[in-house]
Image: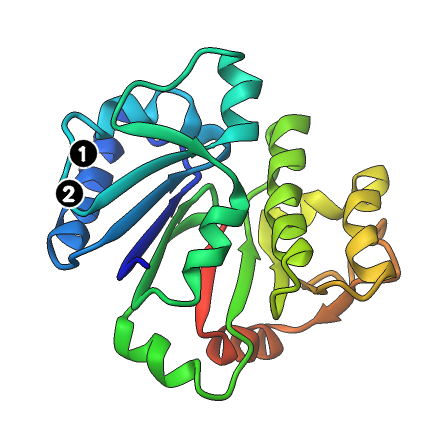
Amino acid sequence: MYDYIALIRCNPSPGDVIRLSGALDAALQAHESSLVFFHGDATGTLPGAIVTTPRRGTDWRVCRTSWVRRWGAVEPESPVAVATLATLFQHMAGARRVDSFGLGGWFCARPAALAENRRASPPLLLEIGCAPADDRQRRETLEVALGAAALELDARVLFHGDGLGHLHGGAARGWNQLTDFGLLGVFAEGSAHRPGFGAAFQAVDAVSAVHLRASAATILIL
């Protein structure tokens, strides 16, 4: 059981690494038990830049699939260890605070707001606002949603801005497997006036997108 969970998917500039490290360090100091989970692009050089020494009460994990894509059979250096996305999601419901440092931005949640929303609302919103740089980013973003669906979490996905690029043309096929079988609700803000999207995605306006965010107890910026 972890009090605090951080999902890191971004690959920040050297200057932003300092800022991220400071934000993360402050959160870790405020909680007794923490899980820091690196996924996607963040499994490159970022763990080595942030994790310099073991910290009591903190587990450092990298996504096994993302790590193997980049490093093959090489094991990460201690105290970092490999884990699956299931590890992240299984512990998320019990955490008092969940932060995400994603390709589309950073979201640092307030524990009081999470506790209030969890009483009567869908607990998880996956927010995608960054265009995929390559097929690997497309695949790894989709894998987060598939992981939530595999565990039958009550989750929704919201695409907006440049993130709508994930839904163009043939790229939408992967996301269609979520909607075709009713696994997750998939929403696209501003897609009503842009061609090339699969019919299975529900178009929403800016007001509806705000309501989706307000009703979620946990938001992960992917």
- Tell me the SS state at disc 1: helix
Residue at (87% x, 60% y) in the render = 180
| Image position of 90 with respect to 124: above or below | above
Question: Residue flagged by tag 2: what amino acid is it?
Answer: Gly
Question: 34 left or right of 206?
Answer: left
Residue ID at (23%, 30%): 50
Q: Residues within 10 Å of mark 2 (few under 14, many from 20)?
A: few
Residue on which the image places disc 2 = 22
**Residue 182 sits in quarter:** bottom right
Left or right: residue 137 compared with residue 15: right
What colour scheme governs how the chains and residues are painted in the rendered image of this protein?
A: rainbow
Residue type for callout 1: Ile
- Give x and y (percent) for residue 106: 36, 51
Q: Which residue is mark 1?
A: 18
Outermost front residue: 1
Badge 1 vs badge 2, beta-carbon distance below 8 Å: yes
Say if residue 4 shows up in the picture: yes
